[in-house]
Amino acid sequence: TLNRVTVVELGVPVWLVSLMVSLPLVFAPLRALVGFRSDHHRSSLGWRRVPYIWMGTLLQFGGLAIMPFALLVLSGDSQGPAAAGPLGAALAFLLVGAGLHITQTAGLALATDLAPPETRPRAVALLYVMLLLGMVGSSILFGWLLDDFSQLRLIQVIQGAALATMGLNLIALWKQESRDPSLTRRDRPAPRFATAWSDFLKGGRSGRLLVSVALGTAGFSMQDILLEPYGGQVLGLGVGATTGLTALLAGGTLLAFAIASRRLGRGADPFRLSGLGALIGVCAFAAVVLAAPLGSISLFRTGTFMIGVGGGLFAVGTLTSAMGMARNGESGLALGAWGAVQATAAGLAIALGGGLRDLIGGLADQGLLGPALTGPAVGYAAVYHLEIFLLFATLAAIGPLVGTAKEAGGPVSTPFGLAEFPG
């Protein structure tokens, strides 16, 4: 919703919006370090995960609190210095992104601590489902609140999100992690991060998984900044209709989780499941590309829904595989590595997608690409074709991993369904 409002209503260039949204990329590679530090946190209070989740929550709140004012200055609707807008928006997005990465990494690690080993993948998957349900509900709510757009309403909605973030995270933290000073005593030996990272990458499976995660995440994420502007500028959809695309994406991902739970419950290979998600993504982006020349909003929505299905299968499959690769109880390191690669790839892809759309779209508007390649859809289509290529590369990278999860004694043989979620 913010992407659409910033580009269409506030008139900020797409490349600048994509750069701001991708700014958390600066912090994303540190997720593995954050996870590792939470594994070996030293404190007299006996908490390992809570301090990191709390600090991440404070950063998120601060970023969301100043974000609407920064965006208004960035749009040029102010009398302040020209540099204040980009600097303020950059600070806001950086704070939100850093808080998100810290909270999510420590939160996923806490989930693995609370659940017994045989239920850890299902516990993390349950958190993922709740995230998607939150996306569906918030997308509908934000679309309704911003349907009659005004700058004051934008400030109210984003600051309301800041308050909701603080409140929900406080509730989520309450009495979740038991205090255990023996795990956080200051004389407890802790390995060096480089040593732990080297042990994690031994054997080659972890490294190939991370490469697959990077390619697949980039393939699915490059459209993140573009789908709603594409619907508005090319297909003529309004704010409410383009906001509904987020609900379609989340709904497709929820369906993907249902499919994944059924297949993994029957002993399916998580790597094969990830490959299936990448293949569905190829078909989905083809549908989105064809929606413009055919003028079909239904095809566009179908492609958007399929992007959610493919991305959901890919995410659940790779996350389940990463959980099985945790060694010596260092779940924070394993999940931090997965999250670091995923977030970094997503940030780079979002920035590259916005830049390519503006560059190629500008060339098309000037007629430099020939008479056949003109119009606002050209820049978007170029990005979608690149995503199709990245998903084919993902299939090539993940192929050799198929079958290795069972050989390594991963979580494939355990049940994976709603009935087995920890209560």
Image: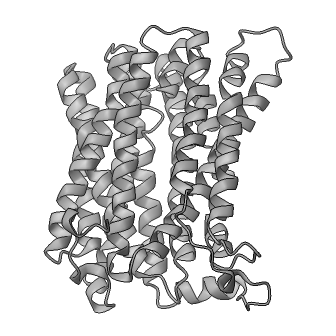
Place of residue 354 in the rendered image (x, y in percent of width and height, measured from the top left): 53, 34
* Residue at x-position 20% and y-position 34%: 302
* Residue at x-position 43% and y-position 60%: 215
Quarter occupied by the C terminus: bottom left
Return the residue nearer the eye: 169 or 22: 169
Place of residue 272 in the rendered image (x, y in percent of width and height, measured from the top left): 24, 71
Q: How many marks?
A: 0
Quarter holding residue 249: top left
* Residue at x-position 23% and y-position 53%: 256
Q: Give left or right: position of 238 versus 166.
A: left
Q: Give left or right: position of 147 versus 355.
A: left
Place of residue 219 in the rendered image (x, y in percent of width and height, measured from the top left): 40, 51
As displayed, is residue 61 above or below residue 237?
Answer: below
Quarter holding residue 66: top right
Residue 373 visible, this angle: no
Return the residue nearer the eye: 102 or 173: 173
Q: Give left or right: position of 262 versus 125.
A: left
As displayed, is residue 100 above or below residue 273?
Answer: above
Return the residue nearer the eye: 88 or 224: 88
